[in-house]
Image: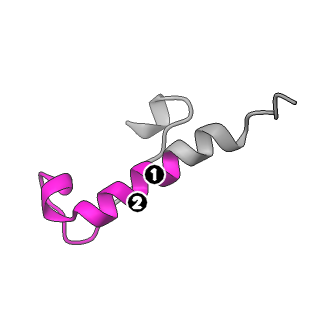
């Protein structure tokens, strides 16, 4: 499915099954944080 959504990516979290935010919250949060950072790292500075 990630191939169909521009800008998306597929990540597999070891140890997670159906509820990664509950089963592996630190790994889940890290992936979200890293993804959000990539969204803003491509933005030009507004100086």
The picture places residue 10, in percent across and down from the top left corner, at 42, 49
What residue do we see at 29% from left, 65% from top? 26
| Placement of the C terminus among the 4 image quadrants | top right
The region drawn magenta spans: 13-35
Picture layout, residue 33 above or below residue 26? above
Q: Residues within 10 Å of mark 2 (few under 14, many from 20)?
A: few
Outermost residue, bottom side: 15
Q: Quadrant of residue 27?
A: bottom left
What residue do we see at 81% from left, 33% from top? 44
Q: Considering depth in this image, is 11 or 47 the residue closer to the camera?
A: 47
* Residue receiving disc 1: 33
Tag 1 near tag 2, CB within 8 Å = yes
The picture places residue 34, in percent across and down from the top left corner, at 51, 54
Label 2 secondary element: helix
Point out which mark residue 43 bears: none
Picture layout, residue 12 above or below residue 10? below
Query: Alpha-carbon distance for marks 1 and 2?
Result: 5 Å
Q: Is residue 17 left or right of residue 32?
A: left
Q: Residues within 10 Å of mark 1 (few under 14, many from 20)?
A: few
Outermost residue, right side: 47
Q: Is residue 42 magenta?
A: no
Magenta: main secondary structure equals: helix
| Placement of the N terminus among the 4 image quadrants | top left
The picture places residue 38, in percent across and down from the top left corner, at 61, 46
Label 1 secondary element: helix
Point out which mark residue 30 bears: 2
What residue do we see at 13% from left, 57% from top? 22
Q: Considering depth in this image, is 14 or 45 the residue closer to the camera?
A: 45
Q: Is residue 20 magenta?
A: yes
What residue do we see at 82% from left, 28% from top? 46
Q: Is residue 7 left or right of residue 18?
A: right
């Amino acid at each position: 499915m990630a191939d169909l959504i521009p800008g998306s990516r597929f990540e597999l979290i070891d140890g997670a099954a159906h509820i990664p935010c509950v089963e592996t919250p630190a790994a889940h949060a890290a992936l979200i944080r890293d993804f959000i950072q990539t969204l803003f790292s491509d933005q030009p500075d507004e100086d």
